[in-house]
């Protein structure tokens, strides 16, 4: 395609921002509509990427380049490959759903809310398509501004604490990454990611660069023990904020590991693999146990996200095709499933304004459609075959068994624990007799809510039943990535590892 | 002396003549009635802005080559042009900012604008100084005007106190600077920058010369309010009338930093290894103090004082590097600092309740509902000062850290980024008060047109700087090159 489709997808939401800016604040309905139409339009445009994407090459596609700061060698470069493409679609899919989900729950400052979400969409898409180090960094960190506002203005009672914690934690990690990026520029003489991917960094420098990137990605991911900002942010954020946080923002870290840490610093990655494994295993087991003890639904799902992200890091650092593909698949399915679970919580929260598990019980009697939807996503989160969650976890475990069977065995216990806390949650909310009086008049999902969940149901089942349509997209890129890592390791004398 | 010789100083001569003219005009305009005071204040302020605008044109017209005047005591090069344009813009903005405030507080006297232009003349001389003597003259001309401006609201106890404090401490710093200059002269036999530079090329500087340099550094550090010579800043910023604080925070800082850069790079550039550690200490201490001390502030002007101390620390990283990239970093930083601060102070000047200025951070509560546009602009300035991309403040820090990493000053760079995270905390606090808290007693609705325009323009620049960063980057790079070539 010869027109700049990636720039279009990235900056189209800003057109919506400009339109909404001129709508009077006392007319929230129009702001909602414009935001929905613009983000929906962005999704449709982004589908063109899916249909025109060449699945047989690992090279960057739809590449655009324009001069930006020529003196420093920084240019506006965007493009996607099999690793980033699906994340772009995930972002453009979730944003309109978020706007639809906040249709009634956001009542104050609707105009500003919609503007914040559309700006957020631009930054998120930009992050995934950026092919220049500094362009990537700008989008990566710019996301914090709208997210800070969304949590702080429309959040729950402890929103100020949560928004500050999120902002400062993430900023702390990313400033170190900025210095590493500068050091990379001075070593390689370019900020072009495609060139940096094949650049061989000095062995002495690699661990430092790796650690600086790790600081940023581990916090964003989040990995144990720097995950504590996430439960707070999730609990206090409005429903749609949680959806975006779990659905897209948590993928920044995993994407970063695959885009930067693994291919650019392969030796350091091997060196630090035990660290990653240890932290991930702790995340999987410990946060699963913590999730089991939660009384707040959102907090429970937040901790489950940390556990699921543990699988992602394990998969990525197995450096096997199955592991890496599993990691990407797990991120995508988690993006859909956890987003849906937060929306599920949002449905009852809008009606009852409580997230306490004990507030509910026996909802199936009044809300059958809700019960079925919840069940589907609950099972997807557990990793039932036939849902997207299964494929990712299975591939990760397959990769992990090839790399280190202990890691695989311990990670597998996480799957069991995941089933425990999710089924326990489901039982307490949905099953049983509807004895609580205040729930006597609760209504089932209306058409708008069903419209929000329908696409997510379709995607989850599609990902579970026919994973090839997604795996095909990433396969060539992942193989190319691992081949590059292998050659780099072989050149550096890691022959024993290169054979894997 | 032929006429050619004074051409480099033409902008300064023009400003000096205009000041005399404005003074006389003001005196003759002045009548017995109070409202005539306001009238002449408005007239002279307007004319002063015009004079500054014309001076920018003159400065730019002389920009294409390096010129010396008055027996090499005065230099005009790309660096001087760049810094002078910034200073002139800053002074012009400061006069515009003060218009409404001065009238409301009954201090609308035309001398204010004249004094600002006077100080600006001093700054221009500082920037162009090529000799320790002309340096001192420019500096004193600036400082004396500033002392008066600080206590301009002469019926107000805090304002006079600020002026006196500034004067006493400023005189001490000037003394140190002079003492250092005399030692430099004693150990080298010259006060001229070019001759000093040639002398130092010969070999390592003598101990006495280094001691002299350190005293000069101490004097200059006072003028840029770098730690440990920063004590006056919060008190003066808090006590002076708000538009005066806005002026202090920008124009004199830019001029003093430009002067600092020239002194360290031109005459003493060869001795960089002897003084680098001093600057590193000053820079790191300023960044840390600026970040940590601001956290507990309740008064927004004090907060801005500590914030400016921090910003000076970042800019000084460029001087630690002591090469062309470093100077470029400083110059980019100064330009963006100018825009951010003018915008932020314009927002602070909107904080009125019942026609009286309020200064507590908590007074901003609920501003996002009562003044959505101004609150948004303030949010932009705060995120920009915190260095969050894609706003301009990020690029300012990027080019500073760029220079630091390039020169291998990793430790300074790491401290710099970590303090910027602490700094983010207090900038975010202002956003929090405006956006996350509800007003009990909202601020006045009316905002004057000048403030609206200034806020709009500066917020626009900060937001969309990333589209065309070359507009600042390229002139800054050229200016840095000119300084090191000369």
Image (spheres, helix red, strand yellow):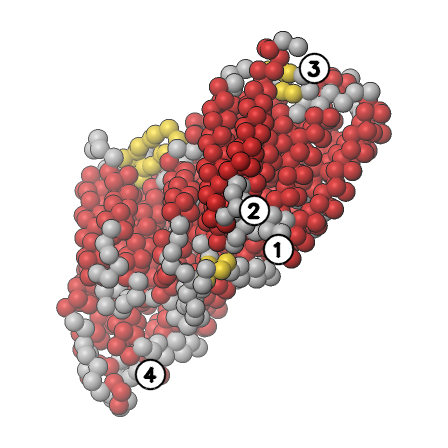
Of the two numbered discs 1 and 3 on the same chain, state the one appearing first in sequence.
3
Kindly identify which numbered label has been placed on residue B71: 3
Check disc 4 and report the residue beneath it.
A359
User: Is A373 or B409 nearer to us in this picture?
Assistant: B409
The chain under label 4 reads A
Q: Residue furthest top?
A: B2
Check disc 1 and report the residue beneath it.
B155
Query: Which residue: 52% across, 46% down?
Result: B32
Kindly identify which numbered label has been placed on residue B244: 2
Of the two numbered discs 2 and 3 on the same chain, state the one appearing first in sequence.
3
**Left or right of A115 in this view: B207:** right
Q: Which quadrant would the C terminus of chain A be assigned to in this image? A: top left
Location of residue B73 in the rendering, given as x and y in whole percent from the top left corner? 69, 20
Verify CB contact (< 8 Å) between mark 2 and mark 3: no
- Measured in 3D between alpha carbons, the distance from the residue under mark 2 to the one under mark 4, in whole angstroms, is 58 Å
Asked if residue B169 is positioned above or below residue B14 in the image, the reply reads below
């Amino acid at each position: 395609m010869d027109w700049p489709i990636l720039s279009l997808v990235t900056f189209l939401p800003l057109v919506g921002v400009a339109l909404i800016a001129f709508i009077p604040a006392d007319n929230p309905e129009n702001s909602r509509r414009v935001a929905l139409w613009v983000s929906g339009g962005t999704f449709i445009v982004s589908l063109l990427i899916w249909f025109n994407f060449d699945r047989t090459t690992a090279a960057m596609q739809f590449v655009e380049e324009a001069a930006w700061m020529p003196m420093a060698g920084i240019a506006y470069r965007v493009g996607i490959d099999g690793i980033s493409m699906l994340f772009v679609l995930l972002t453009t899919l979730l944003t309109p759903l978020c706007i639809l989900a906040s249709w009634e729950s956001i009542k104050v400052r609707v105009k500003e809310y919609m503007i914040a979400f559309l700006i957020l969409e631009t930054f998120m898409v930009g992050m995934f398509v950026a092919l220049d180090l500094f362009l990537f960094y700008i989008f990566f960190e710019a996301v914090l501004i709208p997210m800070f506002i969304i949590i702080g203005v429309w959040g729950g009672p402890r929103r100020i604490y949560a928004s500050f914690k999120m902002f400062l934690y993430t900023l702390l990690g990313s400033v170190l990454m900025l210095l590493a990026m500068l050091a990379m520029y001075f070593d390689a003489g370019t900020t072009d990611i495609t060139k940096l991917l094949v650049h061989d960094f000095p062995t002495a420098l690699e661990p430092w660069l790796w650690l600086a990137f790790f600081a940023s990605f581990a916090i964003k991911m989040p990995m144990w023990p720097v995950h504590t900002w996430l439960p707070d942010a999730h609990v206090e954020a409005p429903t749609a904020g949680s959806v975006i946080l779990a659905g897209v923002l948590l993928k920044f870290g995993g994407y970063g590991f695959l885009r930067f840490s693994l291919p650019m610093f392969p030796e350091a990655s091997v060196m630090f693999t035990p660290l990653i494994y240890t932290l991930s295993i702790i995340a999987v087991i410990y946060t699963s146990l913590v999730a089991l003890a939660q009384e707040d639904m959102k907090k429970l799902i937040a901790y489950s996200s940390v556990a699921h992200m543990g699988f992602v890091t394990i998969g990525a650092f197995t450096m096997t095709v199955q592991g890496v593909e599993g990691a990407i698949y797990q991120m995508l399915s988690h993006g859909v499933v956890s987003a849906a679970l937060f929306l599920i919580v949002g449905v009852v929260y809008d009606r009852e304004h409580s997230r306490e598990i004990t507030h509910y019980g026996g909802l199936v009697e009044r809300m059958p459609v809700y019960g079925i939807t919840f069940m589907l996503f609950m099972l997807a989160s557990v990793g039932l075959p036939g849902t997207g969650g299964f494929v990712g976890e299975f591939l990760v475990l397959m990769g992990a068994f090839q790399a280190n069977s202990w890691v695989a065995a311990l990670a597998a216990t996480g799957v069991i624990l995941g089933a425990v806390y999710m089924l326990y949650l489901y039982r307490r909310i949905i099953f049983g007799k509807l004895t609580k009086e205040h729930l006597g008049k609760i209504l089932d999902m209306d058409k708008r809510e069903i419209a929000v969940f329908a696409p997510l149901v379709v995607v989850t089942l599609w990902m579970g039943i026919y994973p090839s349509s997604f795996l095909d997209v990433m396969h060539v890129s992942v193989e190319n990535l691992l081949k590059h890592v292998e050659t780099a390791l072989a050149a550096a004398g890691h022959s024993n590892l290169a054979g894997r | 002396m032929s006429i050619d010789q004074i051409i480099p100083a033409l902008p300064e001569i023009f400003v000096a003549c205009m000041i005399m003219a404005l003074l006389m005009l003001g005196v003759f305009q002045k009548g017995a009635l109070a409202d005539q005071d306001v009238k002449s204040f408005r007239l002279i302020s307007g004319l002063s802005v015009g004079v500054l605008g014309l001076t920018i044109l003159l400065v730019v017209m002389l920009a294409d080559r390096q010129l010396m005047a008055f027996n090499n005591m005065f230099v005009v090069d790309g660096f001087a042009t760049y810094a002078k344009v910034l200073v002139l813009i800053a002074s012009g903005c400061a006069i515009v900012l003060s218009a409404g405030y001065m009238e409301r507080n009954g201090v609308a006297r035309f001398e204010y604008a004249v004094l600002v232009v006077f100080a600006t003349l001093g700054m221009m001389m500082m920037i162009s100084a090529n000799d320790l003597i002309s340096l001192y003259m420019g500096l004193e001309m600036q400082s004396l005007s500033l002392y008066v401006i600080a206590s301009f609201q002469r019926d107000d106890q805090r304002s006079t106190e600020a002026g006196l404090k500034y004067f006493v401490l400023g005189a001490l710093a000037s003394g140190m600077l002079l003492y250092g200059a005399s030692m430099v002269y004693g150990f080298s036999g010259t006060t001229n920058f070019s001759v000093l530079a040639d002398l130092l090329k010969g070999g390592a500087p003598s101990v006495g010369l280094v001691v002299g340099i350190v005293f000069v550094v101490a004097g200059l550090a006072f003028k840029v309010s770098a730690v440990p010579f920063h004590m006056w800043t919060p008190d003066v910023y808090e006590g002076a009338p708000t538009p005066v604080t806005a002026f202090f925070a920008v124009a004199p800082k830019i001029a003093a930093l430009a002067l600092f850069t020239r002194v360290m790079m031109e005459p003493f550039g060869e001795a960089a290894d002897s003084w680098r550690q001093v600057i590193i200490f000053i820079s790191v201490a300023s960044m840390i103090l600026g970040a940590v001390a601001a956290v507990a502030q309740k008064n927004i002007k004090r907060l801005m004082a500590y914030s400016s101390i921090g910003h000076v620390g970042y800019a000084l990283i460029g001087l630690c590097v002591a090469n062309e990239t470093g100077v470029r970093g400083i110059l980019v930083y100064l330009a963006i600092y100018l825009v951010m601060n003018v915008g932020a102070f314009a927002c602070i000047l909107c904080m009125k309740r019942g026609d009286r200025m309020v200064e507590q951070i908590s007074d901003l509560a609920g501003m996002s509902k009562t003044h959505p546009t101004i609150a948004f602009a303030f949010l932009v300035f705060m995120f920009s000062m915190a260095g969050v991309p894609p706003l301009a403040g990020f690029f300012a820090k990027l080019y500073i850290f760029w220079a630091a990493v390039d020169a291998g000053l990793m430790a300074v760079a790491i401290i710099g980024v970590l303090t910027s995270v602490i700094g983010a905390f207090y900038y975010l606090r202002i956003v929090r008060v405006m956006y996350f808290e509800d007003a009990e007693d909202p601020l006045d609705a009316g905002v004057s047109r000048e403030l609206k325009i200034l806020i709009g323009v500066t917020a626009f620049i900060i937001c969309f700087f990333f589209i065309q960063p070359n507009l600042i980057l390229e002139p800054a790079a050229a200016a840095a090159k000119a300084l090191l070539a000369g």
